[in-house]
Amino acid sequence: MDNWTFGITMLVCGMGGTILTLWIMSLVMALLGKLFPEKPEKKEA
Amino acid sequence: MTEAIINGLSGLTVGFQMLAVDWRNLIMLIVGFVLLYLGIRKDCEPLLLVPIGFGCILVNIPLSDVMSQEGFIRVIYEAGIATELFPLLIFIGIGAMTDFGPVLAQPSTFLLGAAGQFGIFLTLLLALALGFPQLDAVSIGIIGACDGPTAIYVTSKFAPHLLGAVSVAAYSYMSLVPIIQPPIMRFMTTKKERETVMKAVAKPVSKTTKLLFPLVITILGGLIAPKGLPLLGTIMLGNLMRESGVVSRLTKASENEIANVVTLFLGLSIGATMVGSAFVRAETLIILCLGFVAICLDTVCGVGFGKIMRVVTGGKVNPLIGAAGISAFPMAARVVQKEGQKWNKKSYLLMHAMGANAGGQIGSVVAAAVMLSVLAGMGIIR
């Protein structure tokens, strides 16, 4: 594989893959935040 | 008898003779001193630069056998660098030390962590354009991760002959982040943008979310980029131990004893790869320059993405926080806070920048993992 093809493939797949992965992770973490919100501590009687 | 004495004495001077024969060793001894000076006097990443500098001096003393087949540093190198074990052990410590709370409070800052990795791939292209072989270019590009253990892991795998130059570049530029980033941040933004006050992040994160985070990231990241699972898995293991709170002995050992011992061995072994004959070359200078370019490009792309987020959110985001999307944690976040305060005393960007910075920490590992998996997919590595 020539250097040009290699470089552009790495840029597109590598950077695209990184952004996509982190975007999915951000969505999943936002979902987890909604599913398991911080509950205020119960006041002791 | 006289001849025997002369021969015996000549054995004591052969080191000096060899030093005169190969001037590159002399240059590397000076480089070793410079690294020690930066670490001891200038406080630039001393934990790494001091053992690296000393390792460099040890290996460049003529006839030194510390890196020969049975040399003591060779034994350490083979045990921890050649096997890629040391960077992974460091990652457990990093995971145990890092609070990912700020990025969990604002998951969108993960994207700033992604933007801060652009420099890796753009520098890879530059290295290819300058004629470096493909896997060497990958190792040079990874300096842009601004993450020492990741750079060492990737380089020791694909271009061990570049390990010294890449590691020194990665750690030196990480420590120079407060000098490198501010001028770029100012150049990339308008006064109005820099003065933007962001709302305080007050969203608390539940214990369950903090516990699930390392597990979800490991499984998700492992499925997308299995080749980088050791990197992602170790940092998340450290974080799981921290957040679980039930293995405090292991957590403390990971962030103290294990990390300290491994850092010493790692630094010494890397320094010992900096032999004059292999290091004093034009190629090394080019790698150091490309590393600098990589970190500049990370900052440019991070701030550029911050500007996009500002437009998308209708002016609520201060683009300076994009500069914290690199992995130098928490230094980059502090730089953003300081720069923001310089332009507006009412601006408190630290928590937002910490989110981007923690995102950058994950981002650099994900970028390396994706890179390895893309290389495997292309059939370039197994």
Image (cartoon, coloured by chain):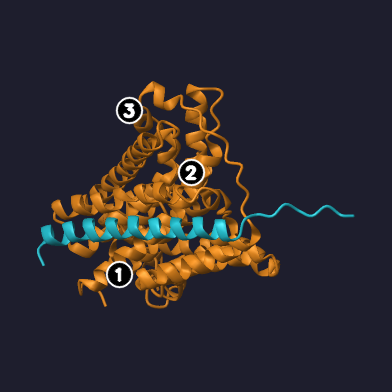
Chain colours: A cyan, B orange
Label 1 residue SS:
helix
Q: Are marks 2 and 3 on the same chain?
A: yes
Read off the chain for label 1.
B
Is any atom of residue B361 visible in this view?
yes
**Residue B373 - label:** 1
B247 or A16: which is nearer to us?
A16
Q: Quadrant of the N terminus of chain B?
A: bottom left
What's the residue type where badge 3 is placed? Phe
Residue that numbered label 2 is attached to: B44
Label 3 residue SS:
helix
Earlier residue among tags 1 and 2: 2
Residue B263 at x, y percent in the picture: 52, 61
Residue that numbered label 3 is attached to: B187
Read off the chain for label 3.
B
Q: Is residue B249 left or right of residue B112?
A: right
Residue B181 at x, y percent in the picture: 39, 36
In this rendering, the answer to whether B369 lies above or below B20 is below
